[in-house]
Image (cartoon, rainbow, N blue to C red):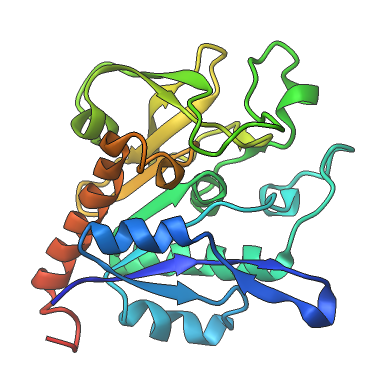
Amino acid sequence: MKPFIGITTGFTGEDSLTRIALREAYSNEVRRAGGTPVLLPLDIKQEDVEEYTARLDGILFSGGGDLSPHFFNEDPVRELHSFSSSRDNTELALIKQARLSRIPVFGICRGCQLINVALGGSLIQDIPSQMPQAIGHNPKEIQYHEPYHSVSILPGKSLIAGIVGQGSLRTNSFHHQAVKQLAPALRVTAQTSDGIVEAFEGEDPAWYVNCVQFHPEMMCEKYPEFRGFFSDFVKAASSACKSSACKSSA
């Protein structure tokens, strides 16, 4: 059976007209890699998280808005304009349950930041104001698939090196927050020339955790090598699926 891949969603609209939203590229790339995408609502109740994750073989934490700094014990800087407690609480609960159940996870942009905070790390709330020496990370008028800056892959064996090779990689970039203090269970695997963390992975060999600060799902059509991030993740989810007889579905 194809592994069931949960994908976290964002929202559009105002208050009573809020709609769950997700760019189609996420589900397209999961499907192309051999997984079955399952869209997750952003307001899953705490008591239902275990039931949701029991039916999933992997979770992709998607991009989106800012994470509340309250979750890493900071007050907001002036440049932080919005966040969603519903989404934050749901995703933090999902990653904690995924850790307990050793469900493979893949974090993209916001998802990368979320996983770091969930495991005990912190964030730079606004790169331009807090790191004025940084290169550009959040262009305003550029296509999503456009390579924007170079990412240096750190020497040594890592998930990202296994996917795209050693050396450097040109990626897109759409974020003004980033990892500040990396969580103890994680290790950096790629960064930009200004020291911003662009990829990290888990230290526990029994739990697949791969996170990137860029958006590979938007690069895949023009740059097929980025599909490797999804095939590697879905492969890990397939292994988890097989080892547990695809949960109760096999």
Q: Residue furthest right?
A: 78
Query: Is 26 drawn above or below residue 76 in the view shown?
Result: below
Residue at 67% across, 47% down: 72
**Quarter of the picture holding the C terminus:** bottom left
Query: Is 200 drawn above or below residue 1 in the view shown?
Result: above
Position of 235 compared to 204: left or right?
A: left
In this rendering, the count of numbered labels is 0
Residue 188, quarter of the rendered image: top left
Query: Is 197 drawn above or below residue 68 in the view shown?
Result: above
Residue at 10% across, 70% down: 243
**Quarter of the picture holding the N terminus:** bottom left
- The image position of residue 155, as x and y in percent, is 26, 16
Position of 72 compared to 189: left or right?
A: right
Residue 165, quarter of the rendered image: top left
Decide which of 174, 249 is in the foreground and name it.
174
Decide which of 250, 30 is in the foreground and name it.
30
Residue 90, quarter of the rendered image: bottom right
Decide which of 172, 128 is in the foreground and name it.
172
- The image position of residue 71, as x and y in percent, is 68, 54
Residue at 37% across, 66% down: 98
- The image position of residue 102, as x and y in percent, is 28, 63
- The image position of residue 97, as x and y in percent, is 41, 69
Residue at 30% across, 41% down: 203
Position of 83 compared to 193: left or right?
A: right
